[in-house]
Image: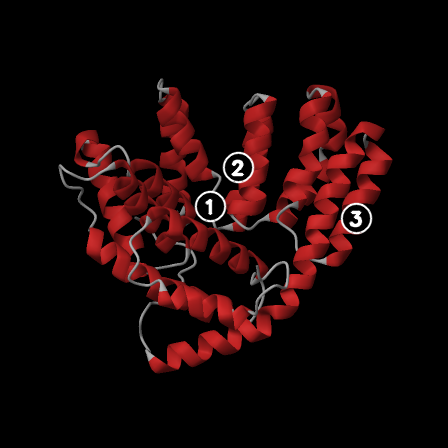
Amino acid sequence: MVESHRTSVSSYLDLVEALRSNSSYFVWYSIITSLKLVDQLQQGQPGREAFQKFVCSLLEPQLASLGWTGKADDNFQTRLMRSQLINTLGLFGDRAVIDEAFRRFEEFQKDPESLASDLRPAVAQIVGRYSSETTYNQLYDLAKQNESNARRSMYLQALQAALDPALARRTLESVLADGMAPAEALEAFERIAVGAGHAGIAWDFAKQHLDELRTRWSSPYLNRLLPSIAAGFSEEHRADELAQLTKEKLPPEAMPDAESTANLIRARARLKTQLPAIDAYVQQRMEQAPGTAQPQPSVIGEK
């Protein structure tokens, strides 16, 4: 509704506040999706840290109510809710959740049965996001050595979540060097660009290697590459750059996807004009309830 200008930012955030005690997975899935979009728009903006603290203040009571350990009578939605809360709190820099995720991951490496299967992807994502080079190397080795496709995919997605720009570049290099299948590689580019917040790094890498990729990938995958990466942008000039590069380097059938994503980027650029109102709302709420979350860390040390 905010995106379509049918309601104000403050009205939407008031609604979110009013739903603090709601325990519905579907309600919180919708809220978290919107909050992640705002966080994407906040990249490089002065209000991002405060916004992330605000989000943590909303989600921490939900996780405290559910706990990390599932119960025998938990239904499917409850398990999904627990996993999503852990994943999101980790993404938004909740120090207690990050530390617990690292602790549980270390135990998991010793005893796989120590970590519930529905929490493994969320825990791995957090470890991958805040990994040091040492932890990254461990995850990479686990991905290469694992015969289980599901487990291998879990580790690869953890690597693709890395917050450290140097590790993001290393992951992009491995996408090509390891001969990853186009479908899997395309998902990796998108996760690094959008999920991990490295759209600029992924964009420059794709431009540098575009001629090589044109010889290795068939049209359906190649035509989606640039839009998948550019979906991580919210600056007007990036929309023009996407359209121009697609026109110059790719066949005409690639243009519809590029133009659709360009329109999405322009819409998000307009939405960014509402960030000052979001910042003001967050500041007011956090002043009323200070100290609800720790600032987001950069990269965890030698875990």
| Residue 28 percent location from the top left of the image | 38, 52
Furthest residue toward left: 72
Furthest residue toward top: 147
Residue where numbered disc 2 is placed: 171
Residue 154, image quadrant? top left
Q: Answer few, some or many: residues within 10 Å of disc 1's Cα (few below 14, many 20 plus, some between 14 and 19).
A: many
Callout 1 secondary element? loop
Callout 2 secondary element? helix
Q: Answer few, some or many: residues within 10 Å of disc 2's Cα (few below 14, many 20 plus, some between 14 and 19).
A: many
Does the residue at mark 2 contact the one at mark 3 (Cβ under 8 Å)?
Answer: no
Amino acid on which disc 3 is placed:
Glu
Residue where numbered disc 1 is placed: 162
Amino acid on which disc 1 is placed:
Ala
Of the two numbered discs 3 and 1 on the same chain, state the one appearing first in sequence: 1
Does the residue at mark 2 contact the one at mark 1 (Cβ under 8 Å)?
Answer: yes
Residue where numbered disc 3 is placed: 241
Callout 3 secondary element? helix
Instruction: Please give left or right for residue 116 compared with residue 130 in the image.
Output: left
At horizontal 61% and vertical 59% (from top left) the residue drawn is 3
Query: How far separated are the C-alphas under marks 2 and 1?
Result: 9 Å
| Residue 200 percent location from the top left of the image | 65, 50
Q: Is residue 295 visible?
A: no
| Residue 174 percent location from the top left of the image | 54, 31
